[in-house]
Every structure is written in structure tokens, then in C-alpha cells.
Image: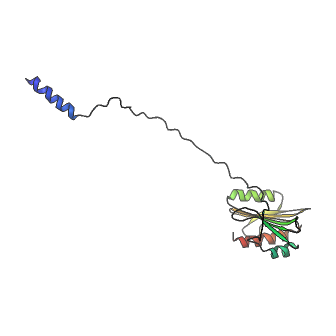
């Protein structure tokens, strides 16, 4: 009799317990695969190309003519954003002065200046807070300076660095950088 009462009681207790799952996959811990990607270091953008006719948005043509000592019959711009390079012509085909502007990565700004005025060039530190160098050659002068994430490079067919420096200062003032 005791057995007869115990069997139904065991059945009721078994029904109240946790069901045993059958054919349910048991989770296993697998090591997670971590993929690390490294982005390539920023590179110096290619030299700007004169593409569009138009006035330089940060440097007056009259100022360039006076400072560089040559008439400017034509100005062309690159397609660089946000600041295009400006090409000031001495004739219909001969560029007398180019102003290249870069704003972005600080390391790239310094590399642009170092490529334009490499080690061994004369030091340049104008306007205040900007540093770089200038190089004179038979074909003219390059004045290149950087500050933080910005670089300005002026290339002139004139040999006097004072002309390129004045133009760089005026461009930086016009750019408000």
C-alpha cells in the first residue's frame, strides 16, 4: 500500500521538476576571433593642378602682381577642397607663382613643408607661430611653412625670398588659418 501511494506521488513530483531537454545543443565556449585592422598612414596628397579659371579666394591678384613684381593676366585654381591652390600666370602659359594650401593631418602638413623646403634649406618662421623653410634656385624660390594641421607653400619664379614670404603671410591672413 505504501508503494501504491508513493508511485503516484513520485510522478507528481517528477512533473513539477525541471524538464530534461533532449536533443538541445549544449553551448560551448569558443575563443572569439578578434580582427585588428590598421589603417594606412595618411599620405601627402598629389601636387595640385591648375584646372579652373577664376580669382583666388584668399589672395588678391593685385597684391600678387605688386608683391611678385609681375603683371598677372590670368589666375587658375585647383580642385582641392576646402582651399584650392592658386596659380598666377605671367603669360598665357607661364606660371609665375603658385600658392598651395593644405589643412588636415599635422604630420602631412609637416611633410608637405619638408618636401618643398627640405633639410638644409634656410629656416622660415613668418608669420609668427609658423615654421618651415625656403629654398632659392635658378628658377625661383619656394617658401613653405606649417602650423599645427595647416601648411602653405608659395613657389615663385622670382629669386627673392622676401616676395614669397610676403605672399605667404597675406595668403595665411586671407585664409584665416
The image position of residue 146, as x and y in percent, is 73, 63
Decide if residue 159 is on the left or right side of residue 9: right
As drawn, 41 above or below 117: above
The image position of residue 97, as x and y in percent, is 84, 67
Decide if residue 41 is on the left or right side of residue 34: right
Q: Quadrant of the C terminus?
A: bottom right
Residue under the image location 73 percent in, 73 percent down: 174
Query: Of 168 and 94, which appears nearest the observer?
Result: 94
Q: Quadrant location of residue 105?
A: bottom right
Q: Quadrant location of residue 116?
A: bottom right
The image position of residue 26, as x and y in percent, is 38, 32
Q: Quadrant location of residue 71?
A: bottom right
Colouring method of the image:
rainbow
Query: Of 85 and 38, which appears nearest the observer?
Result: 85
Residue located farthest toward the left when viewing the structure as drawn? 1
Residue under the image location 83 percent in, 60 percent down: 121
Residue located farthest toward the right when viewing the structure as drawn? 138
The image position of residue 10, as x and y in percent, is 17, 28
As drawn, 59 above or below 23: below
Residue under the image location 76 percent in, 55 percent down: 46
Amino acid at each position: 500500500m505504501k508503494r501504491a501511494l508513493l508511485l503516484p506521488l513520485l510522478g507528481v513530483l517528477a512533473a513539477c521538476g525541471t524538464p530534461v531537454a533532449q536533443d538541445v545543443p549544449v553551448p560551448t565556449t569558443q575563443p572569439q576571433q578578434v580582427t585588428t585592422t590598421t589603417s594606412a598612414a595618411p599620405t601627402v596628397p598629389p601636387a595640385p593642378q591648375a584646372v579652373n579659371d577664376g580669382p583666388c579666394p584668399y589672395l588678391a591678384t593685385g597684391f600678387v602682381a605688386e608683391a611678385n613684381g609681375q603683371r598677372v593676366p590670368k589666375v587658375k585654381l585647383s580642385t582641392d577642397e576646402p582651399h584650392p591652390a592658386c596659380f598666377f600666370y605671367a603669360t598665357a602659359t607661364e606660371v609665375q607663382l603658385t600658392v598651395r594650401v593644405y589643412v588636415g593631418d599635422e604630420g602631412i602638413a609637416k611633410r608637405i613643408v619638408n618636401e618643398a623646403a627640405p633639410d638644409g634649406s634656410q629656416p622660415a618662421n613668418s608669420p609668427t607661430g609658423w615654421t618651415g623653410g625656403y629654398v632659392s634656385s635658378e628658377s625661383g624660390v619656394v617658401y613653405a611653412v606649417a602650423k599645427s594641421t595647416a601648411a602653405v607653400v608659395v613657389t615663385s619664379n622670382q629669386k627673392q625670398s622676401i616676395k614669397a614670404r610676403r605672399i605667404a603671410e597675406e595668403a595665411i591672413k586671407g585664409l584665416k588659418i
